[in-house]
Image: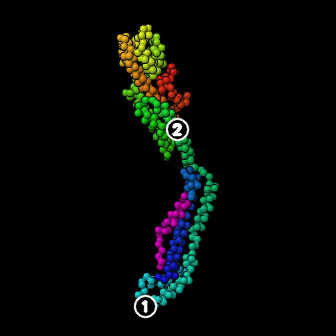
Amino acid sequence: MQDQLRQVVRRAVARLRLLHLYRGASRGLVLGLATALLWVVAQRLFGLPGSLPMVLPGVVLSGVGLGALTAALQRRWSALAALLRVEQHHQLKQRLSTMHLLEGEGASESPELVRLLLADGEAYASRVDVGRAIPLERPRSLRLAGGLSLLLFIVVALLPSLDLLDREAERQAEVRERGRIEREDERLRERAAEMATLAEAQQISEQTRELLSDLARPRVVPKESAPREAVRRPLAELEELRERAELLKEGDLLRGVEEQVRALQGIDQRMETEFGRRAEQALSDGSPQRAAEALRKMAESLRGAAGEEREQLSRDLAKLSSSLGSHFPELSKGVGDALSRLRSGDGAEASGKLGESADQLQRLARLMRESKLLDSIEAEIEFTQDELAQLPREWKSGPPPKICPDCLAGTCQARSGGT
């Protein structure tokens, strides 16, 4: 193919493709504007979700893109069709298309005539104005797009939000409910984190640590749900955590711990030695931790005790063993063994036996701390459940009190509730 004709073909095909895309995009613009107009009307009348600044540009641009893509896939322009459009405008009577066909067939017949036709076509091709032959005229659909744009502007500016189906009210209620749930859950997670921090230094079971970790995780609120349904999943998760706390309290490890501590508080004996009085006071306060510490001090004093001091210690151990006998036979036996060793003159052995009894009280103190921690966890969960469910019963004093760090450590001096 001659150079001039090749350039004409390339420019004409590109021009036709661009014109076809232009028309397709303009039709897509009409479609996008019409869709946006319908959406705005529906949004104002029925409260459809979505933001105008985000939805309108997206809908319109999607329409333009869809129209252009459809036009691009719908038709492919050939060189012959492009040349026919150019010839039609310039009234060339198929000179260029004939030249193109002759080139394609190889021009094997009448070479002299072919050369003349090719030369004639090349001469005309050099004078062709492809831009004028295939102008990028404004599609008629752009007029319709202009009218739709004006109508869309008027509707956006003047049509009030009627929300005939009260969807906006429901949406606002859902937002408020979600915010309420998130605030309550955040409060619960903060309290769980505080309890976990206090429990780090304590010897609590791995199951209780896992419970605290799960309690500190945020609860999932369904993204699309009615306000009355939004709390169901968080409530279900909290109920599962509450049941886990209850099972841990009722398990073999912690069952009966609170009853044992209450039984210790019933011990009321007048002790003679300083450490005996400390132990008796700690037991009556319900603090096995401080009682264990007092017994260890008493055990140390047994090693070198003699004379009147030994007699006083013996009488204190006898009173302590007798008081513990009905409720804590194993602990009573340990104190009794220490008394027997002391009376036989073996202070070191007596000290060891009494130290073992202190270890038993220490274990009880550890179990009591874990039980107290589980009580606090359960109280926090129940309060949050009530707040989320909006039950008629209210907590008159607000949220449950924070757990006392000294109580959890077993060093609280308060008579009621000390650990």
276 with respect to 32 (left or right): left
Please tell me which residue lies in front, 159 or 355: 355
Asked if the stretch drawn in magenta spans residue 65, the answer is yes
Give residue 118's position: percent from left, percent from top.
Answer: 48, 86
Amino acid on which disc 1 is placed: Ser
* Residue extending farthest front: 304
Q: Which residue is mark 2?
A: 186
Compared with 180, 44 (above or below) is: below
- The image quadrant that residue 309 belongs to is top left
Compared with 308, 84 (above or below) is: below
Asked if the stretch drawn in magenta spans residue 245, the answer is no
Q: Secondary structure at mark 1?
A: loop
**Residue 265 seen by the camera:** no
Please tell me which residue lies in front, 227 or 405: 405
Q: Which mark is residue 136?
A: none
Kindly report the secondary structure that dominates the magenta region of the rendered protein.
Answer: helix
Residue at 51% of width from left, 85% of height from top?
122
Residue at 45% of width from left, 22% of height from top?
289
355 with respect to 179 (left or right): left
Amino acid on which disc 2 is placed: Glu
Residue at 41% of width from left, 31% of height from top?
205
Total of numbered circles in the picture? 2
In primary-sequence order, the first of circles 1 and 2 is 1
Residue at 49% of width from left, 33% of height from top?
197
Please, which colouring scheme is shown? Answer: rainbow
Give residue 181's position: percent from left, percent from top.
Answer: 52, 39
Q: Which residue is mark 1?
A: 110
**Residue 221 seen by the camera:** yes
Compared with 194, 133 (above or below) is: below
Q: What stretch of residues is rendered in magenta?
A: 58-82
